[in-house]
Amino acid sequence: MVADDSVLFREGLVRLLAEKGHEVLDAVGDATALQEAVERNQPDLAVIDVRMPPAMESDGAKSAATLRARHPELGLLLLSQHIELHHVLPLVGTPGFGYLLKDRVLNLADFTAAAERVATGGSALDPAVVQALVLTRSGSALDDLTERELDVLGQVAEGLSNTAIAERLVVSERTVEAHIRSVFTKLGLSDEGTNRRVLAVLRYLEAH
């Protein structure tokens, strides 16, 4: 399910997802049509533009919140040209939620991997969104983290696995595991499965 008021962008997403073997049940251009299409088609994932008609404000984000309340199992992947957190914060950290800047779609492999992760209950947050969440805090236990630990924490929040983080940072997976243990010890958070780690970190950020 794709919802974006730009015809070119919307059709591009439809084609990209179809080429990767996914069935796109519907594609719409406004928030009202999005609600109706989800009720009619019952998709696994909705890719939603944050700013769209009818008001051209945060209609997409508001619709996403409504859809999550009605369909808690529905994966929600929000796209935006600019970071808008006001209507998004309640969704951050919930299973099957992602928020990417539209520039990220240009990396087709990253985008489709994020979409597939969100559709199966995982997380996908743009690094810029993670940074914005951190900056909403006015002093916190994050101050105790080293620069490398903050870097690793941001990538955990993106939804990356230890292996993927190790490849990105060009270090061993054991080194990444050590950083993550240190992060969670300092933050007082349990070190469980990847998705639970992401949820714990994001909820911690949201609550402060």
Image (spheres, rainbow, N blue to C red):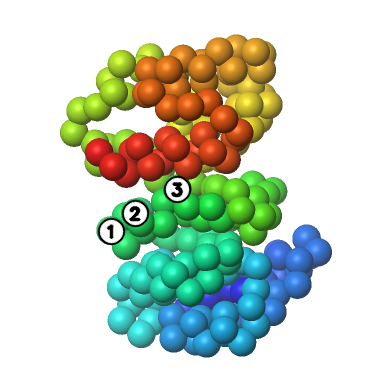
Q: Which picture quadrant has residue 58?
A: bottom left
- Identity, as a three-letter code, of the amino acid under mark 2: Leu
Mark toward the viewer: 1 or 3: 3
Q: In what element is the residue under mark 3?
A: loop
Per the rendering, the mark at residue 1 is: none
Spatial distance from mark 1 to mark 2, Cα to Cα?
6 Å
- Identity, as a three-letter code, of the amino acid under mark 3: Gly
Query: Does residue 138 appear to the left or right of 10 in the view shown?
Result: left
- Identity, as a three-letter code, of the amino acid under mark 1: His
Query: Does residue 90 appear to the left or right of 101 in the view shown?
Result: left
Q: Quadrant of the C terminus?
A: top left
Q: Which picture quadrant has residue 175?
A: top right
Q: Residue at x 63, y 22 (%)?
A: 166
Per the rendering, the mark at residue 93 is: 3
Q: Which residue is mark 1?
A: 86
In the rendered image, residue 127, in percent from the top left (x then y), is placed at: 46, 40
Q: Quadrant of the N terminus?
A: bottom right
The mark that comes first in sequence, 1 or 3, is 1
Q: Residue at x 70, y 64 (%)?
A: 16
Against 89, residue 15 (above or below) is below
Q: Are marks 1 and 3 in contact (CB under 8 Å)?
A: no
In the rendered image, residue 61, in percent from the top left (x then y), is placed at: 39, 67
Q: Which residue is mark 2?
A: 89
Query: Tag 1: Cα neighbours inside 10 Å, few (<14), some, or many (≥20)?
Result: few
Q: In what element is the residue under mark 1?
A: loop
Q: Are marks 1 and 2 in contact (CB under 8 Å)?
A: yes
Q: Residue at x 61, y 87 (%)?
A: 40
Query: Tag 2: Cα neighbours inside 10 Å, few (<14), some, or many (≥20)?
Result: some
Spatial distance from mark 1 to mark 3, Cα to Cα?
14 Å
